[in-house]
Amino acid sequence: MGNGEKETIVILDKQEEELVWLSQLFEEENYEVNIATNLEQVLFCLEEEKTDLLVINFYGEVHKKKEVFLKLRGQERYFGLPILGLFRDEPLETMDLYLELGLDHICTYPFSKKDILIHAEQLIDAMHKRELIDSLNQKILALEKENAILNKKLENK
């Protein structure tokens, strides 16, 4: 976070009780929270502001949420967006499949507030570190190009 802005989390869930619980959990930790119940709402939230984490509660609608997940992971612009999946009563093979498809981390029921917060913070921190590395790499490339131009000018003199 560093710049004083709140980090933003989008939560995808259709179950109102769990949406409220998750929203309160993150809001109490000073996160900006947007909620969505379908792909269109998720995309709207992602377009409106920079999102630091997407939390998908797969409980009750694993296959419908799989479609949403695959559409997001299939778009290059959301490739770096960390996604935390919440699962309940799913076989290990299903959760392993999601990890293979690009889900960043899984929390399984029963999960505590602490579990979810720790995993969310780790995913957000890793994303920010990747962004910093990407930014520094771009600066290095720009400096290398500038250095090559200066060397060429020096050779010409």
Image (tube, rainbow, N blue to C red):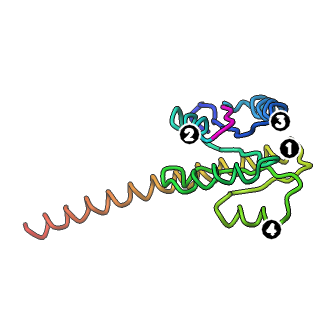
Using the rendered view, name the quadrant where residue 30 is placed.
top right
Is residue 120 one of those drawn in magenta? no
Q: Residues within 10 Å of mark 4 (few under 14, many from 20)?
A: few
Mark 2: which amino acid? Leu
Which mark is in front, 4 or 1?
Answer: 4
Alpha carbons under labels 2 and 4: distance apart: 28 Å
From the image, tell me which residue sits under label 4. Answer: 93
From the image, tell me which residue sits under label 2. Answer: 43
From the image, tell me which residue sits under label 3. Answer: 18
Alpha carbons under labels 4 and 1: distance apart: 25 Å
The residue at the point 76 percent across, 52 percent down is: 62
Q: Taken as a whole, is the magenta stretch helix, strand or loop?
A: strand
First in sequence: mark 4 or mark 3? 3
Which mark is on residue 114?
1
Question: 67 and 133: which one is in front?
Answer: 67
Using the rendered view, name the quadrant where residue 130 is placed.
bottom right
Which mark is on residue 9?
none
Mark 4: which amino acid? Glu
First in sequence: mark 1 or mark 3? 3
First in sequence: mark 4 or mark 1? 4
First in sequence: mark 3 or mark 2? 3
The residue at the point 71 percent across, 44 percent down is: 55
Q: Does 73 sit above or below residue 16?
A: below
Mark 1: which amino acid? Lys
Is residue 35 one of those drawn in magenta? yes
Query: The magenta stretch spans which residues?
Result: 34-38
First in sequence: mark 1 or mark 2? 2
Alpha carbons under labels 4 and 3: distance apart: 24 Å
Question: 16 and 131: which one is in front?
Answer: 16
Q: Secondary structure at mark 1?
A: helix
